[in-house]
Image (cartoon, rainbow, N blue to C red):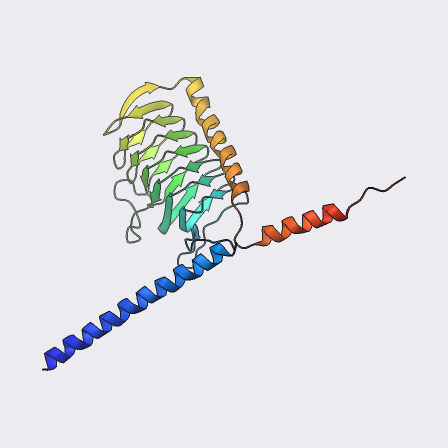
Amino acid sequence: RNSRNRLNKISKMATSKLVQAVVGRGLRETGAALKESSGMEFFTRHRSSMNFWGVKPFKTNDTFIAPTASVIGNVLNWDESSVWYGAVVRADSHPITIGFSSNVQERAVIHTLSSKVEVMEGSGFAPVCHIGHYVSVGAGSVLLSCRVEDHVEIGDKCTISEGAIIQSHVILEPGTVVPAYALIPSGQRWGGNPAAFIEHLSDEAKDHIQTHAEQVHIQAQEHILEYLPIGNTHVHLEQLEATSNNNTKPIQG
């Protein structure tokens, strides 16, 4: 009898929680529908920039973090850097740096080893993730506690494992897999799984790395201009500007 009563009690609690969840969701959806039908702006609860243990990601005024990206914890975003839609930069264990005019493209993931790892055994360095200046991280790529120097172009769906070092003026072909603690020398093109040398880069190819990063920055600025702030402040500003323009009349001589 006691066992049956306990089961009934658990069943009632589960049913109660399910009802609460369904009712809560229904109320939220109803509220959202009313806001949308009334012309109010509707925003997702997703936070593109999130504190972790009191540490807030740092960004400048011209840093673009897409509304569906996730930048978490101890992340330093330099000027003109950008984190695109669906990308994740997770510095909840160790710091991550994204350099000047560098970009992390769609669905790429930048993260570090566990906080339990204070020093990487294969290198003796802290397991931070450093991305230098004028670096393009291709869509769908994964970088883990590695160091990428300045002027590097990482193709789509590349993987760079912990402790790996990518020196300056390097191009990684799409799908390249760089093993843990590997070193990619400066001025070269690599590709394959595992990564293998392909050719030395020409001066034109080296210049294209920075040009490509600058083009992504220009595109990011366009997205910043189109990304409306939370709330309706911009609507009031437009109304004030319109009123000001209507009340301003040229002085008749």
Residue occupying the far front of the picture? 37
Residue, far right: 253
Q: Which residue is farthest left?
A: 1
Using the image as rendered, state which of residue 42 and residue 212 is in the foreground: 42
Q: Is residue 56 left or right of residue 109?
A: right
The image shows residue 155, relative to residue 112, as above or below, that is above
> Is residue 70 placed above or below 6 in the rendered structure?
above
Q: Residue at x 44, y 58 (%)?
A: 32
Q: Relative to residue 238, is residue 72 drawn left or right?
A: left
**Residue at x-position 31% and y-position 64%:** 22
Tell me residue 186's x, y (percent).
37, 26
Residue 117 image offset from top left, x and y in percent: 28, 50
Q: Could you say which quadrant of the image residue 25 lies in?
A: bottom left
Q: Tell me the quadrant of the picture where the C terminus can be found.
A: top right
Which quadrant holds residue 98? top left
Q: Nearer the viewer, residue 62 or 131?
A: 62
Q: How many marks?
A: 0
Quadrant housing the N terminus = bottom left
Identify the residue at image location x=38%, y=38%: 106
Of residues 217 and 119, the one drawn nearer to the viewer in this rendering? 217
Q: Residue at x 38, y 19 (%)?
A: 201
x, y percent for residue 43: 46, 53
Image: 12 above or below 246 = below
Residue 104: x, y in percent?
40, 38
